[in-house]
Amino acid sequence: MQLLQHAPVPATAITLRLAHVDGAATRARIAAGFSTSTAFVSLSPDLVCVFDSPTSTGLTHQEVGAAGVSAHQLWNAAAEQLISRAQRDDGVEFLVRCPSVALDCDELPRGFEVDGHDSPAAWWLSHPRPFTLLHRHFEAVLRPETGLVYATRDWRELFVFDADADEVARHLPGANVLAYSVGFPLLRHAKPS
């Protein structure tokens, strides 16, 4: 009897991904059964962190176990790998550009589009350590008057704004708007399905 179709993926090759649990169908797919269900770590009521490998997205519990670690251990190890990409001798660095370039909109709150250092920037929100590092960095850079909120249209790109979540949702009706809460992302406005 063969349990695994592929050789185990080394834990160092596995990445974090932020995912939206947007209804009963998604919840059923995640909780289908141990060998077929997606391994995840809950972040907030509608958001989870799932794991991807170079050859597969949404690794199962069985695939995570084949890597020789628990989902929680993998979550922490992958977060450290992500953080190491932004570390520089004198602190952390994030590459940014004006959000109007990607959003094709001139009237936006003050903010940036964030580069994720060779991974989708929204994935930095999938663990409290990298999200806290990113959030504190932009608190220092933007010195927000209103508070920082984050937006993503596809769970890959990431924008940070010094604005109220309602204001960002008005400017970007096709985006998910998130807030930082003690290291975890909270979905404030979900993109219409």
Image (cartoon, grey):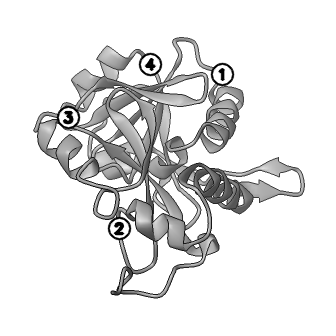
Q: Which of 99 and 164 is in front in this view?
A: 164
Q: Which of marks 3 and 2 is in front?
A: 2
Amino acid bearing label 1: Arg
Mark positioned earlier in the residue sequence (1 or 4): 1
How far is the residue under mark 1 from the one under mark 4?
12 Å
Q: Nearer the viewer, mark 2 or mark 4?
A: 2
Residue extending furthest toward the top: 146
Residue at x-position 67% and y-position 40%: 129
Q: Is residue 81 left or right of residue 162?
A: right
Residue receiving disc 1? 143
Q: For the view shown, which residue lies furthest in the front direction? A: 1
Q: Which of marks 4 and 3 is nearer the N terminus?
A: 4
Q: For residue 57, which numbered disc appears in the image?
A: 2
Residue at 18% across / 45% down in the picture?
28
- How far apart are labels 2 and 1 at the CA level? 37 Å
The residue tagged 3 is 191
Chain-order first, disc 3 or disc 2? 2
Which one is in front, 155 or 70? 70
Q: Residue 62 sits in which quadrant?
A: bottom left
Tell me the crowding category of disc 3: few under 14, some 14 to 19, or many 20 or more residues within 10 angstroms, Cα based.
some
Mark 3 element type: loop
Callout 4 secondary element: loop
**Amino acid type indicated by mark 3:** Lys
Q: How far apart are marks 3 and 2 (CA)?
A: 22 Å
